[in-house]
Image: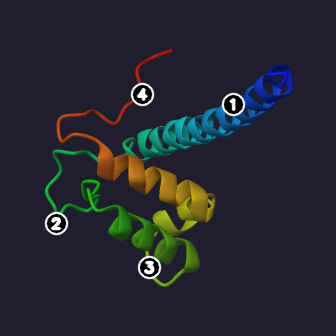
Amino acid sequence: MNAAPLCAVRVVVFAALSATVASTELRAATRDVTGRDIAAACASCHRDNAAPDAAIPPLGRDAAAIARQMRDFRNGTRPSTVMQQLAKGYTDAEIAAAAAYLAGRPASAPLKKPPA
């Protein structure tokens, strides 16, 4: 039996699997960058060292709560003078990415992006 056709099949299967893994990794990396960028915008007003009852509270660490609050602002079910307008600019995917980024960062990690 000629091993060349079997080898060619293995190469094609390996290439297809590699492309799937690479695209999954790329999507995950892109989602993390998007989440970080949106979270950095949030940090313009929300400070980690703010008191929980401050007029502008610190950002939370619970992804589900952050996403729910942002959707509530966007939908108008949670009143706010500023957040309703800001939240309208984000899709569900962007809200989820920012919430996941905020929930996954270490407590000591700054939100601000380093200067380019």
Secondary element under disc 4, as helix, strand or loop, is: loop
Quadrant of residue 61 within the rendered picture? bottom left
Residue 71 percent coordinates (x, y): 51, 72
Residue located 67% across and 37% down the image:
17
Residue type at mark 1 is: Phe
Secondary element under disc 3, as helix, strand or loop, is: loop
Query: Disc 1 or 2, which lies upstream in sequence?
Result: 1
Total tally of numbered discs in the picture: 4
Task: Give the foreground label among 1 and 3.
Answer: 1
Residue type at mark 3 is: Pro
Q: Is residue 24 above or below residue 84?
A: above
Q: Which residue is mark 4?
A: 113
Marks 1/2: CA–CA distance? 55 Å
Say the numbered circle drawn on residue 79: 3
Q: Which residue is mark 1?
A: 14
Task: Give the foreground label among 4 and 2.
Answer: 4
Q: Which residue is mark 2?
A: 53
Q: Nearer the viewer, residue 112 or 91?
A: 91
Q: Is residue 53 above or below residue 25?
A: below
Please tell me how crowded label 4 is: few (under 14), some (14-19), or many (20+) other residues with Cα within 10 Å.
few
Colour scheme in the image?
Answer: rainbow
Say the numbered circle drawn on residue 67: none
Marks 1/3: CA–CA distance? 52 Å
Marks 1/4: CA–CA distance? 37 Å
Secondary element under disc 2, as helix, strand or loop, is: loop
Residue 74 percent coordinates (x, y): 55, 72
Please tell me how crowded label 2 is: few (under 14), some (14-19), or many (20+) other residues with Cα within 10 Å.
few
